[in-house]
Image (cartoon, rainbow, N blue to C red):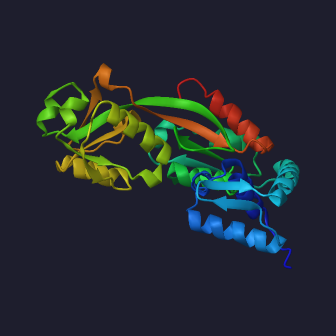
Amino acid sequence: MNNSIDLRQFRYFLALSEELNFGRAALRLHLSQPPLSRQIRLLEDRLGVDLFVRGSSGVTLSEAGTAFLPEVRKTLAQAERAVAAARNVRSAVGGQFVVGYTTVFDRSAIPDVFDRLRQSFPNWRFVAKGKHSISLVREVKNATMDAAFIGLHTETRGLTQEVIHQAPLLVALSAKHPLAKKRRLGFDDLRAEPMFWFERRLNPGFYDHCQAYFEQIDFKPKILPEPPEHHLLLGLIAEGQGVALISSSLREVKRQGVVFRALKEESNALTMGIAVAYAPNNRSAVLSAFLELVRSPPAGT
């Protein structure tokens, strides 16, 4: 029997043992179901036992799986302690600290603390990466990123999340649109408007949060695929091809031919927020300093 088992398979087993459903476990791990099923089968083949009893309504732990579970938890906890110990030593000699930020918000809405971190840790290299929130969460969980500024309502199970900023949604529309004459807009104003909107796979949590509200008010716009870059989106809006609901922070992104209008108070139940997410077992001195700066930004920022 091949005893080569990696920690990734342990994490997959733990997620499935806690969810007892391949679909929910795959969503938690940011995977599709087939690769999760393959890895669980591979783990079972290498152990020579069935860890789960599979049924039409889901799965349950087998006797072997029940015995395996507490040992997996101990193994993963010990691995986290080993990583933390190495990081603590590394903080004194230098290294690389990677921070991600969601591209949904303009960078001005995200605290810029790198200059102050460099003063405290001159031997360190600080890197910023912009991606969608779901990708940022995956990288933090995989320890290829130390912390990330993500959009609220993103699934972050297993990470610590601290809210640092919330902003109302604004309507972005062409300056030539008849609705541009109004100072505030309601969802009734937008019912007949083609609206750029993002795909659920990019941020399932926030997408579902918005859809629940849309269903509550019976709002069913004609959805247009949202471009991946803000300047492309604003360009299409300037041409009059559609409207969009965007974070108020993007108002700082100037685009000729585009105006921004606030939502009416009764329509402003939706907000976009930013949280900083990080692994709770990451005891790096650099991360601790980073979080202190994020929590207490200097006046005027």
In the rendered view, tell whether residue 208 sits above or below residue 26. above
Q: Quadrant of the N terminus?
A: bottom right
**Front-most of residues 56 and 26:** 56
Position of 110 with respect to 261 (left or right) is: right
Name the spot of residue 242 as percent of width and height, x first. Answer: 21, 47
Name the spot of residue 7 as percent of width and height, x first. Answer: 78, 62
Position of 268 with respect to 3 (left or right) is: left
Q: On the image, which quarter does residue 57 sit in?
A: bottom right
**Front-most of residues 172 and 116:** 172
Q: Can see residue 97?
A: no
**Front-most of residues 137 and 231:** 137
Position of 221 with respect to 288 (left or right) is: left
Residue at the spot 58% in from the left edge and 68% down from the top edge: 34
Q: Residue furthest bottom?
A: 1
Name the spot of residue 20 as percent of width and height, x first. Answer: 66, 51
Residue at the spot 64% in from the left edge and 64% down from the top edge: 36
